[in-house]
Image: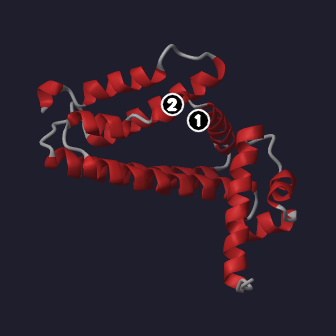
Amino acid sequence: MTRLTRAEQQRRTHEHLLEAGREVFLRRGFLAATVEEIAADAGYTRGAVYKHFGGKEGLWLAIIEAGAESHLAELRRTLALATGRDDVIAALAPVDVVDKDAAKWSAAAAEVLAATAQQPETAALVAAIQQRHDDEVVALLAEHAKRLRLEPALPLHEAVVMLGALGIGLALRQAVAPAADPAAILTHVLDSVFSPEAT
C-alpha cells in the first residue's frame, strides 16, 4: 500500500470533514449540529475541524462554496448542450426541489441566515459566496441566451436572484407544508422569464 504524503493526508481529512459536516447538517440542522459530532462522524477529533475550517461556521462556508462550484460545473455542462429555450429551462429547473435532502438543506440554510444576521463578518462571507455564484450564473445565462437568441423578460441578475429565492423557498416549504408540484411551479416561473414570445 502506498503511503500518503502529508499534503494528501490533509486533503483526505479535509474531504472527510466536508462529507461528515454535510451529513450532520442534513441530519441535525445547523444550530443543533456540534463540532464534536461532525468530527466523530468523520473519525477525527474536534481539533481537526478547527484546524481545517476554524469551526462550524467555517465548515458550513466551505460546504456551500463547494456546492456552488458543483452547481456551476453542472450548469456549464447542461447549458453548453442546450439547443433552445426548453433546454435552458430544464437546466435551470433542478429536479431536486422535491428531494427530502434539499428540504433539509434549505432548513439548515435558513437557520444559518437567521444565526448570522447578527454576525456581520460571517454574513458578509455568506453573501460573498452567494454573489460570486449569482454573477457566474448570470454570465452563463447571458452567454447562452445570446447564442440561442433568447430575450429574457427581466434583467438576468434579477431573474437569478428571484429563481434562487424561489428554489430555496419551495424546497423549505417541502419540509413543513409540501406543495402539490413545486417543480412545476418553478418551471412555470421559468416559462415566464424565457417566454416563447421572447425567442
* For residue 147, above or below residue 186: below
Q: Quadrant of the C terminus?
A: top left
Mark 1 or mark 2: whose residue is earlier in sequence? 2
Image coords of residue 80 (percent x, y): 27, 52
* For residue 12, above or below residue 155: below
Other-residue count near label 1 (Cα within 10 Å), few / some / many at <14 / 14–19 / ≥20 = many
Q: Quadrant of residue 197?
A: top left
- At horizontal 72% and vertical 44% (from top left) the residue drawn is 25
Say whether marks 1 and 2 touch (CB < 8 Å): yes
Image coords of residue 50 (percent x, y): 78, 66
Front residue of 61 and 42: 42
Q: Amino acid at mark 2?
A: Val
- At horizontal 63% and vertical 31% (from top left) the residue drawn is 100
- At horizontal 83% and vertical 49% (from top left) the residue drawn is 34
Number of marks in the rendered image: 2
Say which element carries label 2: helix
Which residue is label 2 attached to? 97
Q: Quadrant of residue 55?
A: bottom right
Image coords of residue 139 (percent x, y): 29, 53
Front residue of 147 and 164: 147
Calculate the distance from the C-alpha at mark 1 to the C-alpha at mark 2: 6 Å
In the rendered image, is residue 124 in sight?
no
Q: Quadrant of the N terminus?
A: bottom right
In the rendered image, is residue 120 in sight?
yes
- At horizontal 31% and vertical 29% (from top left) the residue drawn is 190
Q: Amino acid at mark 1?
A: Ala
